Amino acid sequence: MRRHYNGLKTVGLFGVLWAVLLGIGAVIAAGSGSAAPLWIFALIGVATTAYGYWNSGKIAIRSMQAYPVTETQAPGIYRIVRELSVKANQPMPSIYISPTQAPNAFATGRNPKNAAVCCTEGILNLLDERELRGVLGHELMHVYNRDILTSSVAAAVAGIITSVAQMMLFFGGDRRNANPLAMIAMALLAPMAASLIQLAISRTREYDADEDGAHLTDDPLALASALRKLELGVQRAPLPQEQNLVNSSHLMIANPFKGAGAAKLFSTHPPMEQRIARLEKMAGRTLS
């Protein structure tokens, strides 16, 4: 497994997230003379993170109404996943299939020993075996790189920032000492900053999983071909933007919702054309 500067970028982005959180705490302290509300929200956030991380597999699987399959029911998926798991010297994850025609796949679980890989019926109908192998290599690398922990913590911290900032806007503390413009600015801008940083963390994970997965399968062009098909497939059969699906969408290999313009700007996934270009560049380096 390769390591990238994206890991350092993620650490830096987490630092910025906590800086925003501490900035809100400073404004609360200046306005009310106490930072107690900040720590209350922080404790809630830690508890939420722990629950989400421990149960991440169940939550995502349930949101897609996925069901477990045996090797007899899905021999092709089992063969690919077993081969890649052995190559990576990692345990074999559980295999699930989601009964939706929206083409997508995701991996989840708190660590490699408690992991699950899920494919939708749509992606199984859309991709050939070589392309599916590229997708499964990508998803396995999310598990091996402990990306579930990263995304869970980022989501929880961003949620804390948003909640505290909204509390400031409505309850503002001691108006005699607080700067109302600073309070409003923090309440409006902090959630936006937190969301953008969370999206950036998610996007670095996708780039890493693309590259690491391509190395695992020794076939970057297979994943590039799969992503090209998925981009068109999602536009034809997107998932409905229900909250439980939105909450799990960052786990999927392709943004499962139909959108353009501002919707793409705030997507947890990098633009497909950039991901494909990076993979094709990898293939060029491999061949040369």
Image: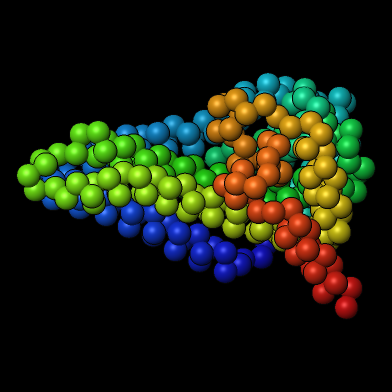
At 47% from the left edge and 47% from the top edge, which residue is drawn? 195
**Residue most toward the right?**
128
Say which quadrant the C terminus sits in. bottom right
Is 159 situated left or right of 180 in this image? right
Residue 95 placement (x, y as % from top left):
74, 32
Residue 85 placement (x, y as % from top left):
75, 48
Query: What kind of colouring is applied to the model shown?
Result: rainbow
Decide which of 47, 245 is in the foreground and name it: 245
Decide which of 228, 121 is in the foreground and name it: 228
At 79% from the left edge and 68% from the top edge, which residue is drawn? 282
- Compared with 283, 92 (above or below) is above
Decide which of 49, 268 is in the foreground and name it: 268
Q: How many marks?
A: 0
Residue 255 placement (x, y as % from top left):
68, 42
At 61% from the left edge and 43% from the top edge, which residue is drawn? 263
When asked about the image quadrant of residue 61, the answer is top right
Say which quadrant the N terminus sits in. bottom right
Residue 41 placement (x, y as % from top left):
28, 37
At 90% from the left edge and 48% from the top edge, which residue is drawn? 130
| Residue 183 showing in the rendered view | yes
When asked about the image quadrant of residue 175, the answer is top left
| Residue 95 showing in the rendered view | no
**Residue most toward the left?**
176
Is 168 situated left or right of 97 in this image? left
**Residue most toward the bottom?**
288
